[in-house]
Image (spheres, coloured by chain):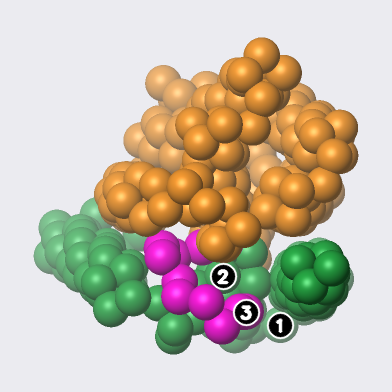
Amino acid sequence: MSEQAIKHPGLNLGPAHGKDDEAAGTVMFGFWVFLMSDAILFAMVFATYVTSLHATAGGPGPRDLYDIKSVFIETMLLLASSFTFGMASLALKYKHRKARLIGWMVVTLVLGVAFLGFELHDFSSMFVKGGVPSRSGFLSAFFDLVPLHGLHVTAGGIWLICLVGQIVRYGLDTKTKLGIMRLALFWHFLDIVWIAIFSVVYLAGLT
Amino acid sequence: MSEQAHNMESQTKAAQEERKEFRSYAWGIGLALLLTVVPFGLVQWMAMPRVTLLIIIGAFALVQMLVHFRFFLHIGFRQKREDLQLILFSTVLLIIMVAGTIWIMASLATRMALPGSP
């Protein structure tokens, strides 16, 4: 990284951004506190899922319902979107043209929407096979955990659209910059939660 | 004139730093790809004992999370003290609550002879 002082965890804007960088410390730390509490929320839903694994009540189980190819595509989409958001963060930090920043953000949004599309397709094919939330404790726990992540991605996508609107309307002022910085953390965080989902839910379910 | 020279200098410095940070993201996505493809490939094509496979999946997931924290979220040991404390304390809470829940519920399943008990 760099020699200058690190004001908060994550990518720092750096002194070239003057007062925006000054304002970042408190705001970004607060957002980290939120992320960590969100991580604990997810962890408890994971614990619920793991303890409900055998509660299939004679209904369909992981092997009948999960599709590894689709999950692999979703994983690749989300990983790529994490990288493209990183490129957007660099475009912001190093003051490239606004079009480049918006371009990377739009690519990220497209990848996120594609991820959600595949996920919804997965859910609907599970429904067709009789895997509805009310069928068993296992399925209730599954539809508590995985769509909770999908809901986070949806919220992130809406937030991203709002930020692009703010860039166009207000330009890159302090609020917009710090909004992008926080969404970057949120987006990378969701990718980390997804690692846990594809490992614990899908891969472990299919072994 | 000297101000111009100063500007030039800070610009090249910024460009160097940008390349460095770009490489961080590139390393991140490269390692993450590897750590994703291997467990997916093992589950899809390799026949091995279930417990071995589960351990491998868990280990790869943990390493990949660390990779994401390091290369995407830029968490290292140069953080301010309270920042790292926040993350580590949350991790401790998380492990205690998840491990405790699974332990208690598994023990309950065993004692009640519920399906899925070992």
* A4 falls in the magenta region: yes
Residue A153 image label:
none
- Pointers 2 and 3 in contact (CB under 8 A)? yes
Q: Secondary structure at mark 1?
A: loop
**Farthest front residue?**
B1
Residue type beneath disc 1: Met
Kindly indicate the quadrant of the structure image that contains residue A162. top right
Q: Secondary structure at mark 2?
A: loop
The location of residue A72, given as percent across then percent down, is 79, 52
According to the colouring, which chain is green? B
Q: Which residue is mark 3?
A: A1
Magenta range is A1-11
Q: Secondary structure at mark 3?
A: loop
Q: Nearer the viewer, residue B117 or A36?
A: A36
Mark 3 against mark 1, which lies toward the viewer?
3
Residue B48 image label:
1
Residue type beneath disc 2: His
The location of residue A80, given as percent across then percent down, is 80, 51
Viewer can see residue A203: yes
Dot 3 falls on which chain?
A
- Height in image: B109 above or below A107? below
Q: Which residue is mark 2?
A: B74
Residue at 40% across, 47% down: A23
